[in-house]
Amino acid sequence: MNIDELKKRIDTKIICKKLLYSKELTSTNKILYQKAVQEKLPDGTTLIADVQTEGRGRLDRKWVSPEGNLYISVLLRPDVDPKNTPIFTFLASCALKDTFDLYQVDSVIKWPNDILIKKKKIAGVLTELKFAGDSIDFLIVGIGVNLNMTLDYISDSMPGISNKVTSLGIELEKKINKEEFTASLVNNIESFYQRFLSKGKSEILSEWTSRWNSLGKQVEIKDGEKVYKGVAERVDENGFLYIKTESGKLEKVITGDFVF
Ligand code: BT5
């Protein structure tokens, strides 16, 4: 990543005001978390890496992180109840969706943290938090976006899921300019974070819901061995998904993976 090029394109007051960069590290979420524990980093501090050797998904899953893609983590210090943390995953998803829209690709938000194109995963969000007593000390919102991963790389390195993964470069059949994509993502994160600061979490939830195309549709979610099937009724401020099953029962789903 050319950081000077990136900075030229960023127009923000909070996000990236402090910008950290590494060519290679274990995980941007892990390293930013460790730094934030050691020193008082300001709201919006951002860490970007070109390669991650231990990129993480939820539940300690692996996030495949070769050179060419985007790995970015943003530290936030919002004044919210820890149980509302998923709002920041939604905030990142809104920013991602609006960025993909600029590239005129049809991206789809999947609850709770995926962005898909043509039913293939192109980006994921991992939000982690540090408590200070009963409240939040800080949050780390980590975003991975497949920008320039090739079909060959995907089929060689991602056995089992290679037909469920894509990159923006594959979709648009061209090399994606990382600085350009990253700057518009950062600018969009800033805009949603500013809206959160002025209007609160319900604003983000409604922005997310308006971009979520599963509302009112039949969905199937797998949570370990349990499978929930039904119509997606709504998502609340704690990130829970409510599904109306065939029997008419309203099920609350706390976490899980879309079956797609
Ligand atoms: C996620 O987890 O989707 C969250 C991914 C967050 C990654 C970012 S990169 C910057 C920051 N630093 C980190 O260490 N992490 C964050 P989850 O919903 O659990 O999905 C993980 C699953 O996605 C894996 O088990 C694979 O099936 C699949 N997967 C792994 N790498 C992928 C990739 N590059 N593209 C698409 N799917 C992938």
Image: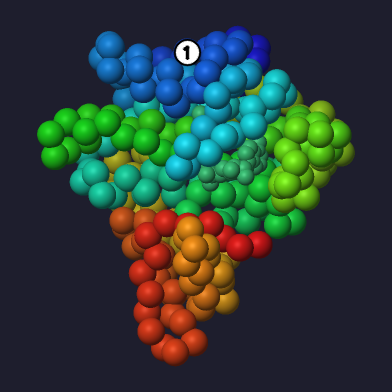
Q: Is residue 34 visible?
A: yes
Give the x, y percent position of residue 187: 51, 32
User: Residue type at mark 1?
Assistant: Leu
**Quadrant position of the C terminus in the picture:** bottom right
Mark 1 residue CB less than 8 A from any atom of ligand 1: no
For residue 58, above or below residue 139: below
Q: How many marks?
A: 1
Asked if 27 appears above or below 38 in the picture, the reply is below
Q: Position of residue 201 (x, y in %)?
A: 31, 51
- Residue in the image at 70% along x and 57% along y: 119
Residue at left 48%, top 58%?
Answer: 224
Horizontal side of residue 98 vs 112, given as left or right: right
| Residue that numbered label 1 is attached to | 20
Label 1 Cα crowd, 10 Å radius (few <14 / some 14-19 / many 20+): some
Colour mode? rainbow
32 sits left or right of 103 in the view: left
Residue at 37 percent of width and 48 percent of height: 86
Vertical comparison of 52 with 164: above or below: above
List the single residue furthest toward the left: 133
Query: Which residue reaches farthest bottom?
Result: 247
Q: State left or right for residue 44 relative to residue 67.
A: left
Task: Report ligand 1 position as a quadrant.
Answer: top right
Residue 67 placement: quadrant: top right
Viewer-side residue, 205 vs 55: 55
Whole-percent x, y for residue 42 in the image: 31, 19
The structure residue drawn at horizontal position 57% and vertical position 76%, both measured from the top left corner, is: 218
The N terminus appears in which quarter of the rendering? top right
